[in-house]
Image (tube, helix red, strand yellow):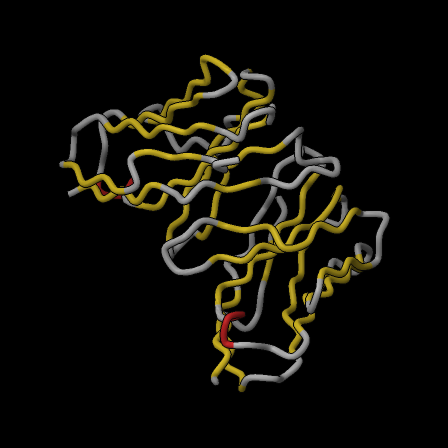
């Protein structure tokens, strides 16, 4: 299996622009997670989906952030408009179920976002 | 709210040394706890997952223990190697099925 695939790997944009991050989970996994990692705050969960349905989006920082999962093999995280403080590494992870059981989360390589 | 602490933030040891990485968490109502490894510029790789009913889990030179009542977990690395150099993060899973990560311990193993 190719693992979790994220694109783009690097993104540099200017403040105010729309940014779309993409994720393809491991085939057969039914849970998908979006995380953000910064030096100051560490790794934080933004939102997670189970069977394509958003379960908890309490970690989404504000309305500028939105996430969708139109089918089992694709998810997007969108920031509109972007701000310099959104600069971070964004990770997508998937698992075979909700993390409360035996399931391990498998992480993608991340997207490094820099907002100028 | 779950808070996870990993101290020290960085550790440097000579090759061959056995070492222990510590993790503490404030809310003992967890389903499991995972230890991850992160290499520079890369994603996270799960090393071990300990269920709340288990006391420890082993994989090769790694052994992780869990004391849920005291809110502590340790990752033991035997006979450390330069290839073990990375950041190690622990993450308990709470009743809301969400992982809360510590900030990690950056390990450097000197040849």
Q: Quadrant of the C terminus of chain A?
A: top left
Quadrant position of residue B94: top right
In the image, A65 versus A25, the foreground residue is A25
Q: Give the residue at the far top of this rendering.
A: A70
In the rendered structure, the answer to whether residue B49 lies left or right of residue A63 reads: right
- The residue lying at 67 percent from left, 61 percent from top is B24
**Number of numbered callouts drawn:** 0
Relative height, residue A61 to residue B77 (above, below): above
Q: Measured from the top left, where is residue A67 in percent x and y?
A: 41, 22
In the image, A9 versus B20, the foreground residue is A9
Q: Measured from the top left, where is residue A30 in percent x and y?
A: 60, 23
In the rendered structure, the answer to whether residue B56 lies left or right of residue A114 reads: right
- The residue lying at 32 percent from left, 46 percent from top is A88
Q: Measured from the top left, where is residue A102 in percent x and y?
A: 74, 38
- The residue lying at 62 percent from left, 37 percent from top is B98
Q: Give the residue at the far front of this rendering.
A: A1
């Amino acid at each position: 299996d190719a693992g979790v695939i994220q694109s783009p790997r690097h993104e540099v944009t200017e403040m105010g622009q729309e940014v779309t991050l993409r994720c393809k989970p491991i085939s057969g996994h039914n849970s998908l997670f979006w995380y953000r990692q910064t030096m100051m705050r560490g790794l934080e969960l933004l939102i997670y989906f189970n069977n394509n349905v958003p379960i908890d989006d309490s970690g989404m920082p504000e309305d500028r952030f939105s996430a969708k999962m139109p089918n089992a093999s694709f998810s997007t995280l969108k920031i509109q408009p972007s701000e310099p403080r959104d600069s971070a590494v964004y990770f997508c992870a998937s698992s075979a179920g909700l993390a409360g059981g035996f399931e391990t989360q498998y992480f993608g390589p991340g997207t490094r976002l820099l907002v100028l | 709210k779950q808070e996870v602490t990993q101290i020290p933030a960085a550790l440097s040891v000579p090759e061959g040394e056995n070492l222990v990485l510590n993790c503490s968490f404030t809310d003992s109502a967890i389903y499991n706890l995972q230890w991850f490894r992160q290499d520079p510029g890369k994603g996270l790789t799960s090393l071990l997952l300990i269920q709340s009913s288990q006391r420890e889990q082993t994989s090769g030179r790694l052994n992780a223990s869990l004391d849920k009542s005291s809110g502590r977990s340790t990752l033991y690395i035997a006979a450390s190697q330069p290839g073990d150099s990375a950041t190690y993060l622990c993450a308990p899973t709470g009743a809301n099925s969400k992982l809360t990560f510590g900030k990690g311990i950056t390990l450097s193993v000197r040849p």
